[in-house]
Image (spheres, rainbow, N blue to C red):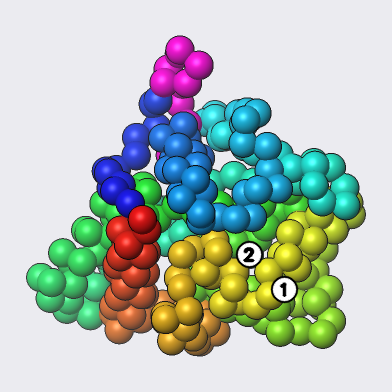
Amino acid sequence: MEINYKQIIDKQNYDNKYLLFDPDSSPETWKYFIDLNKHGEFSFLEKFDLESIDYKIQNNFNRLIAKSNKFSIEGLEITGDTDFNFNDNKYPYFWKKLVEGDGTLNDFKNLEFCIEMHHNLLNFSLMPRTGGLNSTKGVQFGDRFDKFIYQLSVYFTSINKEETEIGKRNNKIVESNYNLRNEFLDSFDSIYDYCKQVYLIDDSHKDFVKRLIESGKTNTISNINDVRSYINLAMEYWKIKREYIENIK
């Protein structure tokens, strides 16, 4: 399957007018999601109405959202999400740690590459909006992909899921939305199944998933070696995902 891996901009044409979108849930990005679904990927999207995708305004930007009525309660919403965050709030910290650790030219080139990849299709995936799972990743786990994968692995392997960081209900979340979110998560067999279906990390890369889990469990990103490790994980993730997509017939 051929994909144009260009950087996605925020101003896009939608319904014959130009609007500002969050790039990870914009018309171009949703076209990419739907094209992958047509090729047999993102099978979980079968439970969502892809013919009636609508947009909502969040922080002055529009976000396209698909809804489902095929869970126990109607109203589960799914939207795009940025996997590895190297935005303007994140990369200065990484840059500072490279400077403090006397980083090499290659270190800084790799960070620049990650910054360029921030709004690339390879760095976008789908995530339930209902129940605040995206907010949990963004706020509670510092918008770190490895920490999110680690906490998801804890959720999937726990007997008492409601006691895990992801399973806990924030009092601000309506209980029905919380239950819907967990029903979506429970439709996957394991962290490996989730990574395969949502992030296109297939079973041949289980070792990579294990390294994501270990990094999210232990890595605090407090020095140059931590930054290097995190950057390497991001670059490897995009390589795995790109190869997977290019092998889709």
Q: Do the residues labelled 1 and 2 touch (CB within 8 Å)?
A: yes
SS for dot 1:
loop
Where does the image place residue 103, in percent across and percent down from the top left?
17, 76
Q: Which amino acid type corresponds to the residue marked 1 in the rendered image?
A: Glu
Specify few, some or many for label 1: CA neighbours under 10 Å numbering under 14, 14-19, or 20 or more.
some
Residue designated by label 2: 140
Relative height, residue 241 to residue 203 (above, below): above
Question: What's the residue at 34%, 35% (across, down)?
Answer: 9
Residue designated by label 1: 165
Instruction: Compare residues 36 and 201 and report the one nearer the observer.
Output: 36
Question: What's the residue at 65%, 48% (across, down)?
Answer: 46
Q: Is residue 16 left or right of residue 152?
A: left
Q: Which amino acid type corresponds to the residue marked 2 in the rendered image?
A: Gln
Where does the image place residue 18, in percent across and percent down from the top left?
42, 17
Quote the CA–CA distance across marks 1 and 2.
Answer: 9 Å
Instruction: Compare residues 146 and 78 and report the one nearer the observer.
Output: 78
Q: Give the range drawn in magenta.
A: 13-23
Q: Is residue 21 magenta?
A: yes
Residue 182 position by quadrant: bottom right
